[in-house]
Image (cartoon, rainbow, N blue to C red):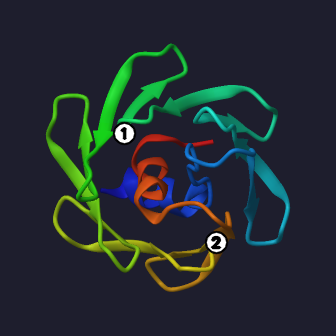
Amino acid sequence: MKKIVIAFAAVGFLLIGASNVNAQQLRSSNGSSTGKIDSDGTIRNGSGSSVGKIDSDGTIRNKSGSSIGKIDSDGTIRNGSGSSIGKVDSDGTVRNSSGSSIGKVEKDGTVRNSSGSSIGSANGVTKEKAAVVFFFFEF
């Protein structure tokens, strides 16, 4: 649980926009660029190195290309074994496996931690795919 909360607080703003034609710049709460998501779903850190990818079917891959999880069409986030580890609600609330809120993705792309503080942004990225990064990637 603690790792998930830390991951959310540290990189919740690193959202995934694989369906967008252009790369998405990802920004921290102070506006500095922390990475980007390429149009093919590749997730890059601030140095430009690939750290993972999300496929069009929701499969999440690590930088080696191995499947490490999936996001279902209903927003359920699963680990590599298929177990549910979280969910993103229709309003953008991201929940852990216990159902506790660990943050939220607002309609305007603002990402908030569980206390409601803004921790970053990535405008134009879907809230469903945003939750994938909360659970799988730390930078």
Label number found at residue 58: 1
Label 2 crowd bin: few (<14), some (14–19), many (20+), radius 10 Å? many
How many dots with numbers? 2
Residue at the (34%, 28%) spot, across then down: 68
Residue 139 lies, with reference to residue 49, above or below; the image says below
Mark 1 to mark 2 CA distance (whole Å): 25 Å
Identify which residue, 136 or 67, lies in the foreground: 67
- Vertical relation: 61 (above or below) 71: above
Amino acid tagged 2: Ile
Query: Which is nearer the eye, 40 or 132?
Result: 40
Q: Is 105 left, or right, of 83 in this rendering?
A: right
Q: Is residue 43 left or right of residue 128?
A: right
Point out residue 67 in the picture as x, y percentages from the top left corner. Answer: 35, 22
Q: Which mark lies nearer to you, 1 or 2?
A: 1
- The residue type indicated by label 1 comes to Gly
Point 43% across, 41% down: residue: 136
Callout 1 secondary element: loop
Q: Give whichever of 97, 72 is nearer the camera.
A: 72
Q: Which of the labelled discs sits on residue 119, or is there none? A: 2
Q: Position of residue 98 (x, y in %)?
A: 16, 65
Q: Secondary structure at mark 2?
A: strand
Which residue is at a point 64% across and 65% down the rendered structure image? 124
Residue 55 vs 122, above or below: the answer is above
> In the rendered view of the protein, which quadrant contains the N terminus?
bottom left
